[in-house]
Amino acid sequence: MNIEKVRELFLYLKSGKIYFNHASSGVYSNRVVKAINDYTEMRSVGEIDNVKLVVETFKRVKNELGNLINTTADRIAFLDNTSNGLNILAQGLNLKKGDRILLNDLEFPSNVYPFLNLKKSEVEVDFVKSQNGIVTAEDIIKNIKPETKLVSISYVQFLTGYRVDLGKIGKYCKENNVIFCVDAIQGLAALRLDVQKYHIDFLSCGTWKWFMGMQGFAFIYVTKELQEKLEQKFVGWTSVEDAWNLLDYNLTLRDSADRYQNGTPISVGAFVLEASLSLLKDFGYDNVEKSVLDNSAYLIKELENIGISPVLQNVSRNNLSGIVSFKIDNAGNVFEQLEKNNIKCAVREGMIRLSPHFYNIKEEIDEVVKTLNKLSK
């Protein structure tokens, strides 16, 4: 499937709008819109009680997610958002006074508050200090202490777009018996990620950004080994092994990660995710990543040509992602002017953040840079 065919599936492109804001919310393709319409029709005039179809769809989508991150479907559970996924880990660890968790000062709050909440149990939370908008794998590793029980980090930093070397951190954590957790929402689906290769113990990821799926639908990955160590604080009727033996009340939790699905997730989210994954798969996951990185590298170069210095202008391609951010005077005003020019992006912490996806093209980047050049004069 070529890029021209992909772009035909995004109706907003016909309006002349340039959407470089996938780090906030991804765009629905025609495939997703059809999935939503089909689901609505099914629930209104078709197979209204669609539980069997939902279960089958969950299985297919988990299998495809497993293919994407190199795991099996039984290690994946569906939830509503990234934060609640991370709370499963934070509340299940039963850390004690003096145990330490390592974060950094550029994390989105979803990857901070679930762990800060443990300070009431006298667990210590350490923050690695960033340098020029970057926290490297080496910065993380050198701040791990003997008392550190968990490292949690974003695959891609939401503000600057820096992609950390997960493999280096994961290897160190594995060798030193430290739990390694990844918030993947700003990287996965735009970039590849291998949970086995990177020794990731726990991963949480929403699907409405780079997956271009539905808000309120997310998933976690957890290793069997870590699952056996976690105390499950919340359970529901679908958490147990024999869920349909309704009056047995036998609290024997499922052996799979399904135990964390305490009830029915927003089912339409799985149908939407299946449709969105089909597009990414048809284009090719590797091709998606290449296009995303090519776009970011080209955008950085063109911004430099007009005197704008992106945060990641001097990093290697291995540390790039789909996010390109830069500081500029009167960022709020610049953002408003970009909006008036039908260019959709974001302003975060005094930075303009641009986040084109794989289907965006160089001509759109050129138009954005051209507009920025006019605004900066």
Image: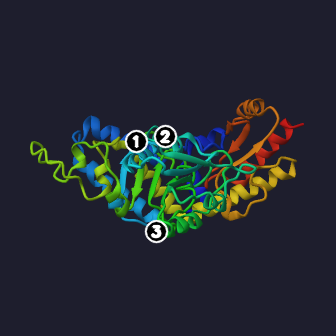
Would residue 268 be visible to someone looking at this image?
A: yes
Label 2, label 1: how many angstroms apart (C-alpha)?
Answer: 25 Å
Along the viewing direction, whichever of 18 and 312 lies nearer the viewer = 312
Residue shown at 44% from the left, 67% from the top:
70
Label 2: element kind: helix
- Can you say which quadrant of the picture contains the C terminus? top right
As shown in the figure, which amino acid type bears the numbered disc 3?
A: Gln
* Residue ID for mark 3: 196
- The 10 Å Cα crowd at callout 1, few under 14, some 14 to 19, many 20 or more, is many
The answer to whether residue 29 of the structure is visible from this angle is no
Q: Nearer the viewer, mark 2 or mark 1?
A: 2
C-alpha span from label 3 to label 2: 31 Å
Earlier-in-chain disc, 3 versus 1: 1
Q: Which residue is mark 2?
A: 119
Residue denoted by label 1: 80
Within 10 Å of disc 3 (Cα), the crowding (few <14, some 14-19, many 20+) is some
Mark nearest the camera among 3 and 2 is: 2
Please, is residue 352 above or below residue 142 in the view? Answer: above
Q: Is residue 261 left or right of residue 296?
A: left
Kind of residue at badge 1 = Asp
Residue furthest left in the image = 247
**Quadrant of the image containing the N terminus:** bottom right
Q: Residue at x 77, y 49 (%)?
A: 310
Question: What is the three-letter code of the residue carrying label 2?
Answer: Lys
